[in-house]
Amino acid sequence: MCVHIRDAKGNKDRPELSRVLAKIVNDRIPGHRLSVDNFLAEGKVQYLFAYKLDFLDWYFAIVTPEEEILKMLPQYRRDFISGAIGASLLLLLIVIVIIWFSVIKPINTLTKTANEIRMGDLDKTVNIKTCDEIGELSKAFNDMTGRLKTQMRELKTAEEKYRSIFENAVKGIFQTTVDGRFISASPSMASILDYNDTDDLMKCVSYPARDLYVDPAQRDELIRMFDVGDTVSDFETRFYKKDGSTLWVSLNARAARDTKGRLSYLEGFLSDITKRKQAEEALFKLNK
């Protein structure tokens, strides 16, 4: 192949350049337009970069001394490192944004909603519609909230029914500690014993064995009965009323125990059986 080289001014170049370019032309890999080779000229290494211009079947060549290339390497290295750092920071920012919107923000939403539900707002739901684990968690969270709302509504209804029974029962309903102090008492309990209300009853009766039982030993007998069972039925005794008069009562109680089986408190019903006792006494006298 005959190679003719002219520089930008139209002057013929040196023969060694023609030899290098001829070698590049002959050794060029098909399909590759850019080729590089080096040669020695004037005691210095020179690099020749040749680019194939297909439409003219010419080569556009640039010769650069090796020392010029070496001078540019530090700047290229700095530019490469700066670019790599910039790209890494950009990638880190993208990862942080993705994590924020796909993980942290949804979890914050779940936490905020959970706190609002804990404060009693059962109408709150989580609006996270994703196809990942967070989306499944939010769906399960909403289902749990719905069930909790239903259970709380049912519990409130049951509580209202119990409260109605407790406040309107004919028999006295009570809860007392083992030593006899009232935990709770129904209005009928206070009425049977002639107290103004439950607050008056619980305020005036601080020690039932002394303030209620005509025979304090019967209080101890009642407690001993729970050593062999959890329920006591039709335990008859005499109580004091607020004005100091007495009445006959019948107690039906059960024991509430802790996890170790120890007696925690008593709860049950109290009935006024004074009229029945009086009738029994009158009948006994007639038969006597």
Image (spheres, rainbow, N blue to C red):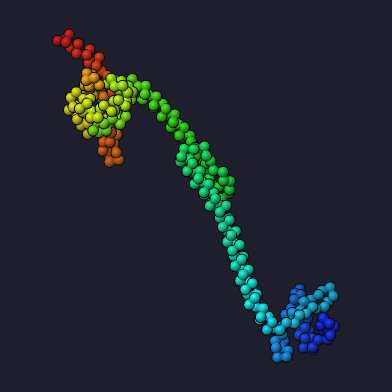
Residue most extreme to the bottom: 43
The quarter of the rendered structure image containing the N terminus is bottom right
27 sits left or right of 198 in the view: right
Report which quarter residue 283 is drawn in: top left
State the residue at coordinates (82%, 74%). 54
The quarter of the rendered structure image containing the C terminus is top left
Image x and y of residue 31, in percent: 76, 73
Figure disc tally = 0
Image x and y of residue 35, in percent: 74, 78
Image x and y of residue 53, in percent: 81, 75
Residue 229 shows up from this direction: no
223 sits left or right of 188 in the view: left
Q: Nearer the viewer, residue 219 or 199?
A: 199
Name above or below for residue 26 compared with residue 240.
below
Report which quarter residue 156 is drawn in: top left
Name above or below for residue 93 compared with residue 58.
above
12 sits left or right of 133 in the view: right
State the residue at coordinates (22%, 14%). 278
State the residue at coordinates (22%, 12%). 279
Residue most extreme to the top: 286
